[in-house]
Amino acid sequence: MRKRTGIEVSIAAAEAVGSANVDVIAAYPITPQTHIVEHLSELVNNGELDAQFIPVESEHSAMSVCCGSSAAGARTFTCTSSQGLALMNEIVFIAATLRLPIVMILANRSLSGPLSIWNDHTDVMSIRDCGWIQVFAETGQEVYDHVMFAFKVAENPKVSLPVILNMDGFILTHVIEPIEFWEPEQVSGYLPTFKPVNALDPDRPTTVGAFGLPGIFTEAKKAQDMALIESKPEIIKAWEELGQVTGRHYRPVETHLAEGAETVFLTMGSIGQTVAMAVETLRERGEAVGLVKLRLWRPFPFEELRRAVGGAKRIIVIDRAISYGGTGGPVASEIRAAFYGEENMPVVTNFLCGLAGRDVTPDDYIAMYQQTRRMVAGRVRQEDYVIYGVRE
Amino acid sequence: MEALNVYAARLLEKNEYFTPGHRACQGCAEALAVRLVAKALGRNVMVASATGCMEIISSPLPFTNWQVPWIHVAFENAAAVISGVEAAYKALARKGRIKDRGTVFLGMGGDGATTDIGFQALSGAFERGHDFLYVCYDNEAYMNTGIQRSSSTPFGASTTTSPAGKKVAGQVTWKKNMAEIAVAHNVPYVATACSSYPFDLMEKVQKAAQTPGPAYVHILSVCPTGWRLPPNKAIWIGRLAVETGVFPLYEVADGRYRITVHVPELRPVEEYLKPQGRFRHLTPDLTAQIQERVTKEYRKLVAKTQFTY
Ligand SMILES: Cc1ncc(C[n+]2csc(CCOP(=O)(O)OP(=O)(O)O)c2C)c(N)n1
Ligand code: SF4
Ligand SMILES: [Mg+2]
């Protein structure tokens, strides 16, 4: 194994963006994303990174600058959290429609209100249908590796779509982890210079962002949907190549002790690590329990998910966001939909927890497992979600 | 160019970069202004446009009237988008991935896109000092969505959200002075223009493009549809806006004011207001209020031209 350096994950993420030789960065500060932009501006001002750092006056402008920059053919990066994402919302959707390969790190934080700076997934779930490729990282090393991955996938001419890399606020952004950095040759071997499919250029004038009358709008949307669906094989290829470079192998859906499991937990992001501890304890007690982790959220990996869940009879979906007055957690409703109509459809129980940074321990997950056993004795419907740990 | 007015037309670029066949209303002087700006800038330009009439009439997928690179993202962000285009160009030229050949960066939007919803993005881009030119096509309302008032709508004008009612006689606020706001940002070149004065307009646009750093040109763009005016009166009413002092043509280069189209004696504002349906309801008292304001503002402007440092 190569040398690992103990470093705050945000700084490592910024270093990765720097190693990717990004051309334009536009960002606005918001906790817990701040350390990433701060470090990037430091790299630029110290002459260690040759890029334009645009300290915009809002996140709406951050994403707008990114659109202009990416359309002009520059490798483009931004990052934000929560309210910042909400403010740039309008442009996030347009960036995907324009097929602009922007990379954004989302340091996941709860959406107001009440105002909170702490971690959950309510921010990213608010833009579930924005058309970006969306991946989740579980550890600092994964964040670092996925910066390179994100640029590679986004800028692949067969893909040409923006990518969101989700990293849990504080739980990942503010911890110090041992990170194995890539050597410059590894980066240049993995990540070619960005050659845009179409760039604004006076020698080859193009019109970008024309408006769609009803006679063409549906076709444009179909094309966009296909582009996202068809990005999946390219995503998988980029992970395979990353494995060759680093020896670390990533997949759309990953498992831990899932073989022969009758019940599996399903998680996204950093809580996978805590749940893994609970699963190990339960296994020691002789319970047939496993863990399935969703790394790729969009395009949704239907096949890989069904394969990973295998013959499990129950799925405990851990959600970090609420769909008020609806189906509970957005991940659970997606998982149910993925299995609907399948033979031996597993029963899905849904726990909403870890909202705005509330700690959830391995014992809590064991308690959810026990509650699931009681629940499945009866009928579990969509709306029977549990907001876990509410103090009555 | 102004000294050569008789020959000026012959000196003009023959090519059109904003081509005929677009879908603007008859007599649209905003489309004319866009055409003149495009002509003045030539082909070595990249354009970011806001949502609005000019975007909608020129880019119905899969057609376009733009012969130069053009991008539209949303309503309120043209200044931010062009900031990004300019930043990308700088980075790529510095890194040797493209050749620097002095491309001009143009951000454009209507009065709504500029003075209201896109105000912050424009202020940010001015403050950051990007090397770009921003042109506001001011037709004094949100025309694309059906003639709603903006902060650039003049006092007294009837629009669909400031209608001339039984109790309130149209717009109750005075037009926001966006050119002055640009000056307050220390933008090195600021000018007002009107498509009824094409040579003055084009000369200012070229000066603005040549200015390093940000530049701002505010163009009064007559909209016959929204102003309730016959299409063949658009150029004429633009001239009256200048001759009455309602919309003086001037430039502010490095903080120095200069009136570019001199009006020895201002005509009464009534001559400008009367022909327009949007002012039809004005009482003599309201007209007098407008006259008083116009005279005062014009005097202030003249005083500024006499200030040196
Ligand atoms: C965020 C947002 N709000 C509202 C609109 C609707 N809208 C589109 S164009 C427009 C008015 C444009 O007015 P202006 O900028 O003055 O340009 P004009 O059409 O008058 O040339 C409005 C309100 C929009 N597209 N986006
Ligand atoms: S509504 Fe006015 S500005 Fe819009 S196209 Fe018609 S005339 Fe031109
Ligand atoms: Mg307007």
Image: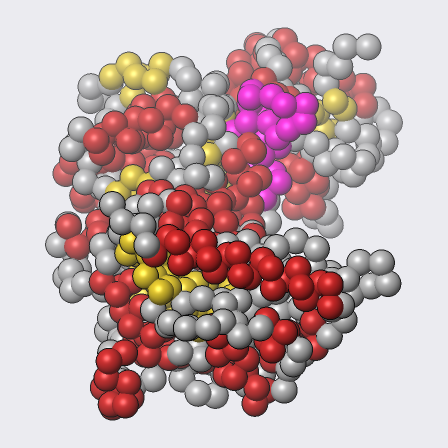
Residue A257 on image: x %, y %: 52, 23
Q: Is residue A244 above or below residue B1?
A: above
Q: Give whichever of B26, A19 is nearer the camera.
A: B26
- Asked if one can make out residue B62 in the rendered structure from this viewpoint, the answer is no
Relative to B185, residue A318 above or below: above
User: Is B300 one of the magenta-colored residues?
Assistant: no
Q: Report the magenta residues as a range.
A: A108-127
B271 lies left or right of B177: right
Residue visible at 27% across and 49% down? B308
The quadrant of the picture occupied by the C terminus of chain B is: top left
The residue lying at 50 percent from left, 32 percent from top is: A81
Q: Colour mode?
A: secondary structure
**Residue shown at 52%/35% (left/top)?**
A84
Decide: is A149 above or below B106. Answer: above
Find residue B189 and report its horizontal and vertical position in percent.
30, 56
Give x and y (percent) for residue B306.
Answer: 32, 54
**Residue B212 found in image quarter:** bottom left
